[in-house]
Image (spheres, helix red, strand yellow):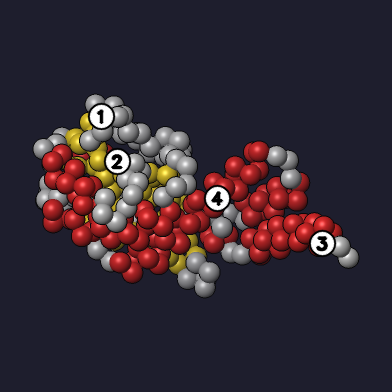
């Protein structure tokens, strides 16, 4: 058997094995559950450090609420940058949006400057500034179990998909145990490294599958994806 035939066999067999693994996996290991749908867009009146209008629609977003005491949360943001941003940044349309009270622009800019030492490209970080009452109203619109603190911030961040759906863990896990995870604690490096890293990977992989499906017809792959979706 010549080298060309071996290469062709490898190229044909490897995708089949990959999709068979996906098909045999538990549903929640291939798709991230939806916690809430069609959430509110960021207000067009809110400003950002760069002056651009930041939106959630058509973006995969890590959404956080910094609060008035920005420096107090510096370590949390550093954990997020090191454990998640540096690992996954580069995927198209992936952004980190941090909502902060008006008047904290200088502190947020300084934090980004400090990140420059370890991270070359910070274009995926978006700091958005709003009145505290609007921040509270926006946060409450998600109907989360957790609440903002007295500084209108929280160490927890949430995942939002391109359709502004809040994604996370809900229902039975691989072990058949009930679980619910609506947010990820940036104080805990372990939470970021384990649960959040896995869930971001699942969400990004979900969109990679969707992109491949839309670019060319592949009946075998489409059948696998359809079977997985039917098991929701």
User: For this rendering, which residue is in front, 154 or 103?
Assistant: 103
- In this rendering, the answer to whether 85 lies above or below 135 is below
Q: Which sits earlier in the primary sequence, circle 1 or circle 3?
A: 3
Q: Which sits earlier in the primary sequence, circle 3 or circle 4?
A: 3
Q: Which sits earlier in the primary sequence, circle 2 or circle 4?
A: 2
Residue linked to disc 4 = 206
Q: Which sits earlier in the primary sequence, circle 2 or circle 1?
A: 1
Residue linked to disc 1 = 51
Looking at the image, which residue is at 50% across and 65% down? 172
Q: Are marks 1 and 3 in contact (CB under 8 Å)?
A: no
Which structural element holds mark 2? Answer: strand
Q: Nearer the viewer, mark 1 or mark 3?
A: 3
Looking at the image, which residue is at 70% across and 39% down? 216
* Disc 3 from disc 4: Cα separation: 34 Å
Q: Quadrant of residue 14?
A: bottom right
Q: Are marks 2 and 4 in contact (CB under 8 Å)?
A: no
* Disc 2 from disc 4: Cα separation: 23 Å
* Neighbours of disc 3 within 10 Å: few (<14), some (14-19), many (20+): few
């Amino acid at each position: 058997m010549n080298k060309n035939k071996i290469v062709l066999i490898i190229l044909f067999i490897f995708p089949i094995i990959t999709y068979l693994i996906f098909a045999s996996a538990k549903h929640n290991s291939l798709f991230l559950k939806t916690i809430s749908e069609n959430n509110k867009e960021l207000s067009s009146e809110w400003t950002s450090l760069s002056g651009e209008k930041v939106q959630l629609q058509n973006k995969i977003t890590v959404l956080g609420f910094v609060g008035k005491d920005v420096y107090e949360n510096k370590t949390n943001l550093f954990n997020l940058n090191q454990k998640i941003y540096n690992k996954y940044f580069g995927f198209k349309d992936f952004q980190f949006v941090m909502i902060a009270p008006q008047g904290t622009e200088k502190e947020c800019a300084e934090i980004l400057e400090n990140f420059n030492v370890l991270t070359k490209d910070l274009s995926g970080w978006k700091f958005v500034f709003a009145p505290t009452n609007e921040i509270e109203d926006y946060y409450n619109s998600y109907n989360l179990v957790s609440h903002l603190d007295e500084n209108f911030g929280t160490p927890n961040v949430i995942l939002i998909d391109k359709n502004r759906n809040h994604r996370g863990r809900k229902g039975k896990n691989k072990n058949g145990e009930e679980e619910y995870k609506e947010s990820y604690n940036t104080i805990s490096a372990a939470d970021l490294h384990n649960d959040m890293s896995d869930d971001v990977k699942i969400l990004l992989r979900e969109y990679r599958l969707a992109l491949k499906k839309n670019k060319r017809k592949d009946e075998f792959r489409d059948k696998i994806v359809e079977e997985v979706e039917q098991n929701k």
